[in-house]
Image (spheres, grey):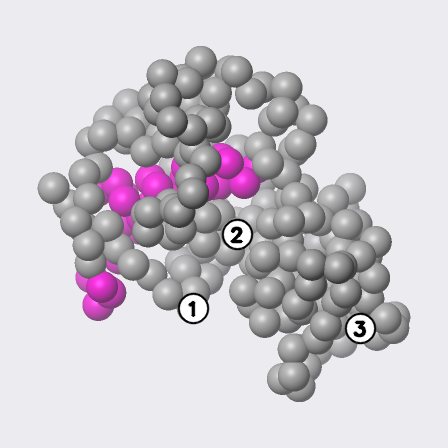
């Protein structure tokens, strides 16, 4: 048995920013570009990415992917390869979600050690058993935390803050601008809108209307370019 950590948004942003900086990806530079999630998984964490049919892991829901900690292997469900190839944002988020299980819930990684030394709330979970990403009516906390990790890693706050600042200088932000930003970051529009709301930068309602949060924007006005 080992401890699965509950980490606040602020702690998760600090952790994922450390991972990016350790890898050499600077979220503070002026270029909006996608986080190289495959490279980070394979070269920074020395994990393998593979494809296999893994529907048998859960008969109750749609299994998207799984991580097998003892094998250091992330397995994407071959059954859904067409979906992943069509929706690159879903593919990247799924990879980042499984990496989140490795970082947050698998003992022995440097980041796990750092978390062990931090004073964060603990709950009990198994680590040797595989974690797998599937559909839930209500997600367990470990899945919520892996989602939070994925969002913070793929959409770092410094990049989002500068992007929204630049868009605000242009004038009224429209959904088309957010779709372009999502494309530039290689994430889905749904993941981006959740992250923007979570970071209290923008709120998008069910009708697609965009609202600014009330806090005064204190980010610097810098010129950004988007890498496609």
Q: Is residue 87 magenta?
A: no
Q: Name the image quarter holding the N terminus.
A: top left
Q: Name the image quarter holding the C terminus.
A: top right
Depicted 13 relative to depicted 90: above or below: below
Write the start and end of the magenta stretch as one range: 92-121
Disc 1 marks which residue? 10
Q: Position of residue 18 (x, y in %)?
A: 43, 57
Residue 185 relative to residue 166: left or right: left
Q: Position of residue 111 (x, y in %)?
A: 31, 51
Q: What's the residue at 48%, 17% (across, down)? A: 51
Q: Position of residue 131 (x, y in %)?
A: 32, 33
Q: What's the residue at 36%, 16% (across, down)? A: 56
Q: Bin the neighbour count of mark 3 within 10 Å (Cα to Cα): few under 14, some 14-19, many 20 and up.
A: some
Q: Quadrant of residue 212?
A: bottom right
Q: Quadrant of residue 91?
A: top right
* Label 1 element class: helix
Q: CA distance from mark 1 to mark 2?
A: 13 Å
Disc 3 marks which residue? 168
Q: Earlier in the sequence, mark 1 or mark 2?
A: 1
């Amino acid at each position: 048995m080992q401890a699965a950590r509950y980490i606040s948004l602020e702690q998760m942003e600090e952790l994922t920013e450390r991972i990016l900086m350790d890898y050499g990806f600077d979220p503070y530079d002026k270029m909006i570009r996608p986080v190289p999630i495959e490279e980070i998984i394979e070269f920074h964490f020395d994990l393998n990415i593979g494809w296999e049919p893994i529907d048998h892991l859960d008969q109750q829901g749609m299994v998207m992917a799984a991580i097998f900690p003892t094998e250091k292997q992330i397995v994407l469900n071959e059954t859904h390869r067409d979906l992943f190839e069509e929706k690159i944002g879903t593919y990247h988020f799924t990879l980042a979600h499984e990496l989140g299980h490795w970082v947050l819930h698998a003992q022995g990684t440097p980041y796990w050690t750092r978390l062990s030394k931090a004073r964060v709330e603990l709950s009990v979970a198994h680590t040797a058993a595989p974690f797998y990403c599937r559909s839930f009516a209500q997600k367990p906390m470990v899945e919520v935390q892996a989602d939070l990790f994925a969002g913070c890693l793929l959409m770092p706050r410094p990049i989002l803050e500068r992007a929204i600042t630049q868009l605000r200088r242009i004038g009224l932000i429209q959904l088309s601008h957010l779709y372009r930003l999502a494309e530039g970051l290689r994430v889905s529009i749904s993941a981006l809108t959740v992250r923007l709301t979570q970071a209290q930068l923008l709120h998008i309602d069910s009708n697609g209307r965009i609202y600014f949060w009330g806090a005064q924007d204190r980010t610097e006005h810098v010129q950004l370019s988007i890498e496609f």
